[in-house]
């Protein structure tokens, strides 16, 4: 079977990719997907740790992931609603244009 | 692919972070359940995981499920509030 | 099921839109706000019953027994903080009856307000890290929408998007840190984590988890490199929501850090002392230097919130009973002072329509009650003696001297002196001679807005002169953070 370290490395690699996506991408929808990637990295970490001991599965981690998936979906819904209004005000989906608030 | 300054800096930092991560993971293996208290384990055997796992969730974690329902309600109310249309004139 | 307080809050969250629809039929929009205020007052009264129960010991509510069930663990600190949240929520709801009367979508506004308060009360009541996370998300989702509530203005939408992205990233980071703690100890219950990690040898993964959790909760608590959402969100939100955000939402971040540090990370206390000490110093300095450049009154107050979070972190870093008493007391006092300041600033903005400090010259002469309360709250924020800010800052400074970290105490004193510069400048603007025509015609703020403001000013003066009952409650709360601490 695959060693636990590989799963943890994968979860952290996804986390780093998510942070990279939030820091460098310009499109607002891609930022929202970056948040989803971050949350999924945490989910993979939970599930991998639930399966660490061979032959047994811990249901606590699975319950946590099921509940957290629902919450992630609602955050995305609210985020996309706000992006709709940002597009109506600014006319572009580029986040670098939202620079009017400074200082 | 445009070599935007921020993209280049971001890529370099991400590669550096991944290299650091590989070094840390290779040095210390993860102490799985090392600090766990021994009588406290509640683990299912790998057969029929689905129904047993869901019965665990409904018996032990029901408070979280109810609060998640309220969070969904708040998200729905929020989206309705943001997408409302109003016919009368608005103040500035 | 849940304790009566949470039950009432949830019932009123669900039924406020119905009451709002009924109010719309009867053509009296303000009834919705009255309904929400009644709900918040009722749950505040039910807290008294919990308070008397909690004086004898920790109350725990769970539907099933065991180390894995989602449970609520209510002790004195929880009840103290829940009182602050419901009190400030009630003041904001009563204030919004008049402030938001020209907006549409009011039933949803009040429903989201009560949902945000119930999320915050749930965060302090929870006894398990994942239950805390779920209530945290409830609070956050309601606050994202409330910041961007006046969506016709570009400012609110931009601030709301920035706040959402940073706060959601913070929540995801917290979740990853929690998964590492779960992996090491098999449970996420506070009692279980404390027992598991109490005598443990520190491990490299414990440090990684510590870093992730500081980063995750620190976004909401506005610790300095992660604070950039705060000035925009607080100035773009409607004023009662700004009062709630600045007063209590950022304090839930400090509470969550306190809880996690004293249960899961007890064994590595030396390390997190140093990281947090540097962070608190930078937070205080940034929070007190940036307002010197501001012209917008709400941005100025928002930056000063960051400075006060720095003071609270000093109390946490000190880590002794006295330092934590100071932090808990300062949480209460800061909510009172900053809430009063934001509500007064909102009353001024409601009358003259602009947030720039230069346009407000002389408004104190036309709105005397508002200006007096504003001056009282700003003097309290500086930390002047007969008012309550002085008491809590004194306890924090004494705690830092007692624990041999005198440099932090001196930093707090110097920062308080520095903050006097911009607070006094604001007070001076209120009493300058009147220059513009618009201010000549301004009347005093409406009575419904004056009632919560005056009550808060009265409490600021009362708790400054007579802080004894509060100090004893704060001491009990701080002692409640340490029930599993065996070492010294």
Image (spheres, rainbow, N blue to C red):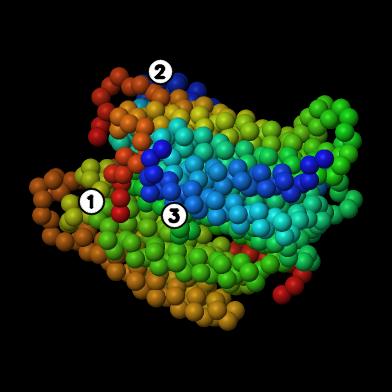
Mark 2 vs mark 1, foreground winner is 1
Mark 2 vs mark 3, foreground winner is 3
Provide the secondary structure element on which disc 1 rests.
loop
Image x and y of residue C38, in percent: 50, 37
Provide the secondary structure element on which disc 3 rests.
loop
Image x and y of residue A4, in percent: 77, 46
Kindly identify which chain the residue marked by label 1 belongs to.
C
Provide the secondary structure element on which disc 2 rests.
helix
Quadrant hosting residue C3: top right
The structure residue drawn at horizontal position 30% and vertical position 50%, both measured from the top left corner, is A102
Distance of label 1 from label 3 (alpha carbons): 22 Å
| Whether residue B62 is situated above or below residue C178 in the rendered picture | above
Q: Residues within 10 Å of mark 1 (few under 14, many from 20)?
A: some
What residue did someone put label 3 on? C227
Can residue C440 be seen here? The reply is yes
Distance of label 2 from label 1 (alpha carbons): 39 Å
Q: Which disc, if any, is residue C103?
A: none
Please name whichever residue, B19 or C78, is drawn nearer the observer in this view of the structure. Answer: B19
What residue did someone put label 1 on? C356
Can residue C83 be seen here? The reply is no
Image x and y of residue C155, in percent: 31, 40
Please report whichever mark, 2 or 1, sits nearer to the chain's N-terminal start. Answer: 2
Kindly identify which chain the residue marked by label 2 belongs to.
C
- In-image side of C181 versus C455 (left or right): right
The structure residue drawn at horizontal position 70% and vertical position 62%, both measured from the top left corner, is C204
Image x and y of residue C437, in percent: 9, 47
Please report whichever mark, 1 or 3, sits nearer to the chain's N-terminal start. Answer: 3
């Amino acid at each position: 079977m695959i060693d636990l370290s590989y799963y943890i490395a994968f979860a952290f690699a996804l986390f780093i990719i998510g942070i990279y996506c939030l820091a460098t991408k310009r499109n607002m929808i891609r930022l929202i997907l970056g948040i989803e990637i971050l949350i999924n990295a945490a989910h993979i970490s939970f599930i991998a740790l639930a399966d660490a001991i061979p032959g047994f599965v811990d249901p606590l981690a699975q319950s946590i992931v099921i509940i957290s998936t629902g919450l992630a979906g609602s955050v995305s819904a609210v985020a996309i609603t706000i992006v709709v209004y940002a597009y109506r005000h600014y006319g572009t989906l580029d986040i670098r244009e939202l620079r009017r608030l400074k200082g | 692919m445009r070599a935007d300054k921020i993209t280049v800096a971001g890529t370099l930092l991400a590669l550096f972070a991944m290299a650091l991560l590989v070094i840390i993971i290779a040095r210390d293996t993860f102490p799985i359940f090392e600090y766990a208290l021994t009588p406290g384990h509640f683990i299912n055997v790998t057969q029929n995981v689905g129904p047993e796992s869901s019965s665990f969730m409904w018996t032990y974690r029901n408070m979280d499920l109810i609060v998640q329902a309220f969070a969904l309600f708040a998200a729905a109310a929020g989206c309705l509030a943001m997408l409302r249309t109003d016919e009368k004139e608005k103040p500035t | 099921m849940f304790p009566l307080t949470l039950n009432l809050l949830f019932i009123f969250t669900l039924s406020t839109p119905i009451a709002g629809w009924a109010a719309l039929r009867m053509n009296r929009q303000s009834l919705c706000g009255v309904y929400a205020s009644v709900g918040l007052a009722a749950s505040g009264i039910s807290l008294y019953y919990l308070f008397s129960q909690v004086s004898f010991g920790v109350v725990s509510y769970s539907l099933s027994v065991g180390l894995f069930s989602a449970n609520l663990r209510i002790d004195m600190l929880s009840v103290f903080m829940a009182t602050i949240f419901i009190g400030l929520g009630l003041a904001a709801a009563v204030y919004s009856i008049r402030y938001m009367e020209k907006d549409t979508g009011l039933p949803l506004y009040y429903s989201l307000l009560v949902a945000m308060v119930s999320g915050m009360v749930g965060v302090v009541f929870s006894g398990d890290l994942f239950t805390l996370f779920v209530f945290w998300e409830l609070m956050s989702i309601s606050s994202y929408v409330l910041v961007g509530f006046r969506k016709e203005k570009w400012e609110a939408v931009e601030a709301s998007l920035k706040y959402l992205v940073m706060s959601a990233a913070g929540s995801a980071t917290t979740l990853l840190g929690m998964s590492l703690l779960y992996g090491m100890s098999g449970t996420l219950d506070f009692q279980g984590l404390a027992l598991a990690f109490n005598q443990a040898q520190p491990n490299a993964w414990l440090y990684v988890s510590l870093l992730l959790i500081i980063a995750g909760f620190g976004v909401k608590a506005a610790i300095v490199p992660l604070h950039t959402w705060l000035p925009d969100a607080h100035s773009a939100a409607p004023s009662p929501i700004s009062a709630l955000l600045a007063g209590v939402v950022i304090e839930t971040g400090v509470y969550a850090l306190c809880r996690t540090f004293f249960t899961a990370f007890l064994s590595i206390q030396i390390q997190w002392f140093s990281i947090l000490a540097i962070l608190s110093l930078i937070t205080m300095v940034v929070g007190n230097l940036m307002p010197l450049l501001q012209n917008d009154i709400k941005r100025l107050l928002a930056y000063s919130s960051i400075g006060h979070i720095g003071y609270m972190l000093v109390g946490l870093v000190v880590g002794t009973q006295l330092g934590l008493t100071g932090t808990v007391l300062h949480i209460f006092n800061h909510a009172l002072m900053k809430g009063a300041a934001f509500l007064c600033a909102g009353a001024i903005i409601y009358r003259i329509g602009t947030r720039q400090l230069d346009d407000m010259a002389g408004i104190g002469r036309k709105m005397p009650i508002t200006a007096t309360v504003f001056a009282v709250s700003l003097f309290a924020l500086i930390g002047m003696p007969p008012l309550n800010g002085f008491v809590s800052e004194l306890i924090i400074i004494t705690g830092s001297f007692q624990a041999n970290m005198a440099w932090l105490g001196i930093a707090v004193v110097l920062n308080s002196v520095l903050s006097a510069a911009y607070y006094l400048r604001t007070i001076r603007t209120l009493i300058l001679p009147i220059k513009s025509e618009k201010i000549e015609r301004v009347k005093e703020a409406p009575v419904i807005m004056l009632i919560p403001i005056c009550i808060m000013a009265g409490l600021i003066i009362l708790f400054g002169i007579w802080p004894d009952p509060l100090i004893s409650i704060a001491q009990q709360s701080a002692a409640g953070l340490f029930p599993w601490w065996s070492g010294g």
